[in-house]
């Protein structure tokens, strides 16, 4: 493999720094979204006890949107992590080092049921029957 010049090393270092900054910002955003989801869960619990259906529907809508945004950030985080690993491997092979990145992270996909979808489907069925 060709030797890396100083400008190549600086270029790779800048790319790696940008990737790590993007990853850190996204991780902070995920933590913020997790806090928002916890707060919404508490509000949902209390509004369910108060039997305020319109507020429950509003909170479930907000929760559904935040969960979708969080899933998007999870995908973004995994993409940035993969890019950091690829760039690290490229730098290590260019410098003649061993590339041992460990086991690849397998994306886990879980089936999640949105609470808003469950409630909306139930309400739609009840209203359709005219009950």
Image (spheres, rainbow, N blue to C red):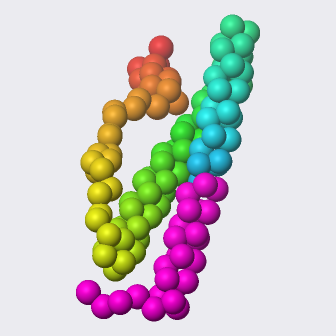
For residue 66, say whether it is visible: yes
Quick one: quadrant of the N terminus? bottom left
Residue 89 lies left or right of residue 59; in this view the side is left
Q: Position of residue 76 (x, y in %)?
A: 48, 57
> Which of the 4 image quarters holds residue 41?
top right
Q: Position of residue 57 (x, y in %)?
A: 63, 28
Q: Is residue 70 above or below residue 14?
A: above
Q: Residue at x 36, y 78 (%)?
A: 95
Q: Position of residue 90 (x, y in %)?
A: 35, 74
Q: Nearer the viewer, residue 128 or 89?
A: 89
Outermost residue toward the top in this view: 49
For residue 128, say whether it is visible: no
Q: Is residue 124 magenta?
A: no
Q: Nearer the viewer, residue 24 or 8?
A: 8
Q: Is residue 36 above or below residue 29?
A: above
Q: Is residue 75 above or below residue 12?
A: above
Q: Residue at x 45, y 25 (%)?
A: 118
Q: Residue at x 64, y 48 (%)?
A: 29
Q: Is residue 28 above or below residue 18?
A: above
> Which of the 4 image quarters holds residue 38?
top right
> Which of the 4 image quarters holds residue 113?
top left
Q: Magenta segment range?
A: 1-25
Q: Residue at x 52, y 70 (%)?
A: 16
Q: Is residue 3 magenta?
A: yes
Residue 17 lies left or right of residue 110; in this view the side is right
Outermost residue toward the front in this view: 96
Q: Nearer the viewer, residue 8 or 130?
A: 8
Q: Position of residue 84 (x, y in %)?
A: 44, 64
């Amino acid at each position: 493999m060709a030797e890396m010049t100083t400008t190549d090393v600086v270029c790779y270092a800048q790319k790696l720094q940008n990737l790590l900054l993007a990853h850190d910002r996204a991780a902070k955003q995920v933590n913020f979204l997790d806090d928002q989801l916890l707060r919404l869960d508490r509000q949902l619990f209390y509004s369910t006890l108060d039997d305020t259906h319109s507020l429950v529907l509003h909170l479930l809508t907000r929760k559904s949107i935040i969960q979708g945004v969080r899933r998007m950030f999870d995908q973004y985080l995994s993409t940035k992590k993969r890019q950091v690993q690829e760039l690290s491997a490229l730098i290590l092979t260019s410098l003649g080092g061993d590339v041992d990145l460990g086991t690849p992270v397998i994306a886990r996909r879980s089936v999640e049921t949105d609470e808003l979808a469950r409630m909306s489907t139930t309400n739609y069925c009840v209203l359709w029957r005219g009950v």
